[in-house]
Amino acid sequence: MSATPETSRPSIFWPLAAIIVPAVGLFARIEVRGAENLPREGAYVLAPNHNSEFDPLVVAVAVWRLGRAPRFMAKESLFRVPVLGAALKATGMVPVPRASSGASQSMKAAEQIARDGRGVIVYAEGTLTRDPDLWPMRGKTGAVRLALAGDLPLIPMAQWGVQEILPRYGKLKFPRRSHVVVEFGPAMDLSSYAGTPPQPSALVAATDAMMNRVAAMLSGIRGLPAPAERWDPTKHGQNETGRLEP
């Protein structure tokens, strides 16, 4: 692991890493590409694709190996759950704002992240991809909104191979140690989308550009062309959980 100020200081991440890193290593041989694109210090927003319930562990290990503490956006309601809420707060996880107060809460979260010099991982799709071939689907604007609110670097990320360990909504395959590729892309230039506040159309356009970047990176990993358009659950009769609308 690369030594950085963030991981060289004792923290709750040390005992967690002592357990999670070797455990994940039993399932995955992680190849990290584009390591130079993840800032060694300072705040950032990392936006990976999501195709397996197991991939948050792989993403966390990859980020930790590069010397940063992995912190995710988590549902605001989870912070009110006894014990779990305390653990989320202790590890610096960031609550996902409610839709009704999204803009102001994003600004507050971004300001706190910037002050602390932390990074945060945001699954822009909001849930596991519904694309039949596991390409990134249409994203939500949370990652872009957070990056713009705090003028934080927005780093697209693509990962592939985790679905061989735990298929989407499938069963864990063990013993099996699969090759997993994790690629960090260069930070996106969001200057053309910035505003005070950013317009909804600009947030959507920036999010589409981000998801296209992730898809292009994934295309390079898979050696296959990505679809020209992102899968949109609302156009296929699905709700946010991926279930068919009644």
Image (cartoon, rainbow, N blue to C red):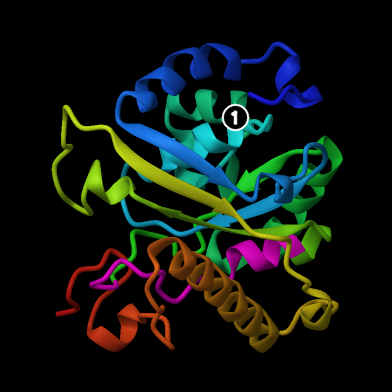
How many neighbours does mark 1 have within 10 angstroms: few (below 14), some (14-19), or many (20 or more)?
Answer: some
In percent of the image, x 35 and y 41: which residue is there? Answer: 179
Residue 154 sits in quarter: bottom right
Residue 203 sits in quarter: bottom right
SS at badge 1: helix
**Residue indicated by mark 1:** 65
Residue 216 among magenta residues? no
What type is the residue that disc 1 sits on?
A: Arg
Q: Is residue 158 above or below residue 173?
A: below
x then y, percent, for residue 107 = 76, 58
x then y, percent, for residue 183 = 55, 52
Is residue 128 in view?
Answer: yes
In percent of the image, x 51 and y 24: which residue is there? Answer: 87
Magenta-tinted stretch: 131-147
Observer-nearest of 174 and 137? 174
In percent of the image, x 15 and y 48: which residue is there? Answer: 170
Observer-nearest of 142 and 223? 223
x then y, percent, for residue 163 = 27, 50
Most common SS among magenta residues: loop
In percent of the image, x 72 and y 51: which residue is there? Answer: 37
Observer-nearest of 168 and 25? 25
